[in-house]
Amino acid sequence: MSTRRNIIVGQSGGPTAVINSSVAGVYTAAKELGFNKIYGMLYGIQGLLDEQYVDLSTQLNTDLDVELLKRTPSAFLGSCRFKLPEISADPDLYEKIFKILDKLEIDVFCYIGGNDSMDTIKQLSDYAALKGYTQKFMGVPKTIDNDLAITDHTPGFGSAAKYIATAVKEVIRDSLGLSYNKENITVLEIMGRNAGWLTGAAALAKTEECCGPDLIYLPEITFDMDKFVEKVRDLVKKQKNVVVAVSEGIKLADGRYVCELSGGGDYVDAFGHKQLQGTAAYLAGFLSEKLGCKTRGIEFSTLQRCASHISSLTDINEAFMVGSAAVKAAAEGNTGKMITIERVSDDPYRSRPGIYDIHDIANNERVVPREWVNKDGDYVTEDFVKYAIPLIQGELEPYMVNGLPRHLVVKK
């Protein structure tokens, strides 16, 4: 390892309930390995370009602070959605980044994020190799979407799935309580642009005392409005209460998002992602018009990724694990890699960290396998449930102060 012995960690993309546990893992491992300075980028690579960073030793003064950080949702250090250009398009930008890293005597750069963030690690490690820089670049997986390639799953997904399954159960109880002598249709909109992992998690709500949602639609399967209406119509004839879970990214045969039928917003982020919203509201209105029933559209929105009060202990522990493993891998000389989670067994559930080349991960998207969706394309199979159930196990109680959870915030 370089004699510089300083490390920097940043967070990028949409936050999760456990992203800060990965920061805690990086910090703890870096201390154990004797790094001199452990920096945190404020607002990811975008903040670093403005030389916005903190010394994490001034933020995490005690073991209690580290434990509190594990229980704090969203990005403790601040996040960003900043796309690095191709190296050939703006080499001066890369030189600016590396001058900042040299100024801070950084030996290891860890970036916690999803697909777009892993592209950042790829670009920076490629530039370092091209120009002879010696910093090591490690990706730490994070995304509630669970769509990173190679890894069995990603930290953040388990807690979001736990929240979704819990909320679906609660919505079903609420709907059943109001379904006497009248039809009641509820459409739940769950995050997922191209991958339906989160929406599939609604199936976990089917338990001994809960029937679960009646229909589940993922973006991997083309959505047919006519078949959808007929399915719901048939259900309403048999039961008063109907609950449907849909991904925000479900598309029609012509490629349009269903949410676009309502004339949704035109906002597009730095990575070219169109903002998706209004799918549940549109479908609820459509069903009301076609079937003449009382309907309700519910959008879970950001609650899916920030509900740390019901996070999965398995998820928290694995988020810590991958953060720690990234530091150890870099200390052993690895660069241009991402830490993966390898499933060792289901019963009892066990996992371990792996290391994989970032070039095989960045810009690749893992979707729900077709065989994990039923023939009609309106529900997930038991294989999906068996895959997801271990990831939502366990709880880490928040520290409560005056009846509310206490969170850790950056001291500037």
Image: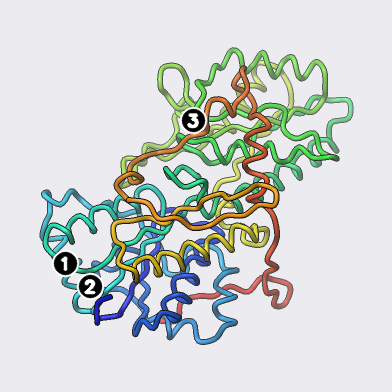
In whole angstroms, how far apart are the C-alphas of marks 2 and 1?
Answer: 10 Å
- Taking depth in this image into account, of 64 and 108 the one nearest to the observer is 108
Q: Residues within 10 Å of mark 3 (few under 14, many from 20)?
A: many
Where is mark 1, residue-wise? 133
Q: Residue at x 43, y 81 (%)?
A: 31
The earlier-in-sequence mark between 3 and 2 is 2
Q: Position of residue 46 (x, y in %)?
A: 29, 62
Query: Residue placed at 36% from the left, 41% from the top?
Result: 267
| Tag 3 secondary structure | helix
Q: Is residue 65 left or right of residue 30?
A: right
Amino acid type shown at disc 3: Cys
Which quadrant of the figure has residue 338? bottom left
Q: Quadrant of the N terminus?
A: bottom left
**Disc 1 residue type?**
Tyr
- Outermost residue to the right: 180
Any mark on residue 259, and which? 3
Q: Is residue 40 above or below residue 87?
A: below
| Up-down relation of residue 30 to residue 234 (above or below) | below
User: Which image quadrant for residue 225?
Assistant: top right
**Where is residue 87 drawn, in percent x and y?**
15, 52
Question: Residue 101 bears which disc, if any?
Answer: 2
SS for tag 2? helix
Q: Nearer the viewer, residue 211 or 335?
A: 335
Q: Nearer the viewer, mark 2 or mark 1?
A: 1
- Mark 3 or 1, which is nearer the eye? 1
Q: How much space separates mark 3 and mark 2, taking CA atoms?
A: 43 Å
Quarter of the image holding residue 66? bottom right
